[in-house]
Amino acid sequence: MLPQGTPRGIALFNTGTTRVGGMKAVVAVLEKLGFEPQPVIQHVGLNLEMLSDPDFIVPSALFGRLFAHCVAVTKCEHFGMLVGSEGSLSWLGRVGFVASNSENVAQALQVLGEYFYYHDRSAVVALKVENDQAVLSYNLLFKMEAQSQWLGGVMCCALKIMRELCGPLWAPSEVRLAIPRPVDIRAYERFFRAKLTFDAPATGLVFDTSWLERPIEHAQPELRRILMKEMRSNRFDPEEFPLDVLRIVRTTIGSGNCTAEKISGLLGISVRALSARLEEHNTSFKQIVENVRFEMAKQLMENTDMPLRDISEQLDYSEISAFTRAFTRWAGIAPGNWRRTVRA
């Protein structure tokens, strides 16, 4: 049952799906650690045949459970990073293929951000520029079990993808992780060899913007053009319009510019059309924004040690009191009490 006060429409977005992609790497890591993969994987409702098909679609929550169970079985606290370090653009299917055939790194990362949902409908990828630094971020739309494991693995995979695009000399200047600082960070230092920022509001890799102009070797523009045409023609499914809006809101919130005018402009429609189409799905722009804020608040409170004041700023609240009132209305409990309860 949803908590009293949960924003109307939140039930529309209580799950997500993901292509298996490269998750067969879980099998390889289990074997390297000396464990028989089949019983471990079957414990969460998966099997070896599923993981061998990169285009097989599963509920994203299953991967969270799988990572949690693998850590419990192997006692390896950096299991997720071991899996992610096997990553490549090929894991992302057609989106990765289009990215690898882009003109330059900026174009490739823009493709990943715009079409990532072809691979994963439970997260969003975004490229932003902060002065002379670029930030490639990854944010979950929904709470996931073993979230720290998943995010660590995703950043290892992102690092491998960036080296695939830029060459082996590429390195981030900073790795931001929306997780609490572990007691022992040696594994993170060994994997990333960069400045580490824990309790970050968003997970991502930071690097010099000069890399964005780097041409991608061996790219085939004609192949990219054909695939891009196909992806654009199938870009929006009318039945998933609220989720399309939610994805855009998730990448915009925190900028201070998450308005109906901004989002409708990005979608190429009027504010009136945005409202009408969302009403057809029994929701509204305001309810979607509240949904995103609620999910972000829960993830940041449970999975980081960020102060509540900083969290409220990340959610575009001008005052912490406004955030406190909103969260209490959604969850039926004040944010500080909610955090203490889930982390007890």
Image (cartoon, helix red, strand yellow):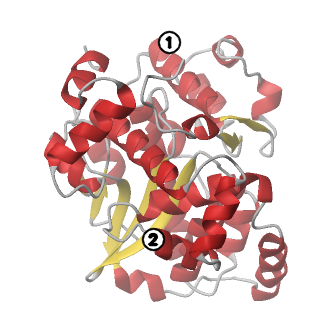
- Local crowd size for mark 1, using a 10 Å CA cut-off: few (<14), some (14–19), many (≥20): few
Q: Position of residue 24 (x, y in %)?
A: 69, 36
What residue type is disc 1 on?
Answer: Val
On screen, 241 above or below 312? Answer: below
Give the number of the disc on residue 168: none
| Residue hosting label 2 | 127
Q: Secondary structure at mark 2?
A: strand
Q: Quadrant of the N terminus?
A: top right
Q: Nearer the viewer, residue 229 or 281?
A: 281
On screen, 152 above or below 204? Answer: above
Q: Position of residue 77 (x, y in %)?
A: 37, 25
Instruction: Look at the image and tell me whether residue 111 can be seen.
Output: no
Q: Secondary structure at mark 1?
A: helix
Q: Earlier in the sequence, mark 1 or mark 2?
A: 1
Q: Position of residue 62 (x, y in %)?
A: 63, 27
Camera-nearest label, 1 or 2 = 2
Q: Marks 1/2: CA distance?
A: 36 Å
Q: Residue at x 80, y 30 (%)?
A: 50
Q: Residue at x 65, y 38 (%)?
A: 23
Q: Residue at x 80, y 40 (%)?
A: 56
| Residue 296 falls in image quadrant | top left
Instruction: Look at the image and tell me whether residue 304 can be seen.
Output: yes
Q: Is residue 250 left or right of residue 185?
A: right
On screen, 334 above or below 113? Answer: above
Q: Is residue 294 left or right of residue 270?
A: left
What residue type is disc 2 on?
Answer: Leu
Q: Nearer the viewer, residue 283 or 238?
A: 283
Give the number of the disc on residue 73: 1
Q: Is residue 66 left or right of residue 335?
A: right
